[in-house]
Image (cartoon, helix red, strand yellow):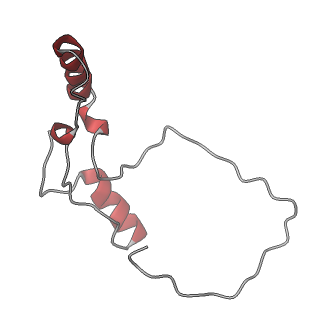
Amino acid sequence: MVHETDESEEVQQVKENLNMELYNTMQKETYKDVHVSDALNEEQRDRVWQLVEEFQDIFSDVPKVTSMAEHRIQLNSSEPIRSRAYKLLYHL
């Protein structure tokens, strides 16, 4: 179920863990905002809409948390890299 004003439990948990505001936590776009090309015939458009509706949870402008991916960072040495701290703009 899509809630336009309520944040998901996942997002709330991440915000609590990070103790900071995440970007774009309020959903403004849904699967209903997907544009299907007019170049497709009616049958093709219907098939595309069936897929969009089936996988509607991935058609969102709100980032999600996943455990589906893993990564490794391989370092050349164990020596810490030191650099001067600098400010970042919050809206980046």
**Quadrant the N terminus occupies:** top left
Q: Nearer the viewer, residue 87 or 8?
A: 87
In the displayed orientation, state which residue is furthest to the front: 39
Residue 65 drawn above or below residue 75 = above
Find residue 28 and report its horizontal and vertical position in percent.
18, 55
The correct choice, above or below, for 27 with respect to 59 in the image is below
Frontmost residue, 34 versus 58: 34
Quarter where residue 86 is shown = bottom right
Q: How many marks?
A: 0
Quadrant in the picture for the C terminus: bottom left
Answer left or right for 89 relative to 28: right
- The residue that appears at 25% across and 52% down in the rendered structure is 9
Vertical placement of residue 47 versus 59, above or below: above
Residue at horizontal 21 percent and vertical 38 percent from the top: 31
Task: Return the x and y of residue 54 as percentages of the image width and height.
Answer: 24, 24
Q: Name the image quarter holding residue 13.
A: bottom left
Direction top: furthest residue: 43
Place of residue 58 in the rendered image (x, y in percent of width and height, measured from the top left): 31, 38
Rendering quarter of residue 24: bottom left
The percent position of residue 30, horizontal first and vertical second, equals 19, 43
Residue placed most toward the observer, 12 or 59: 59
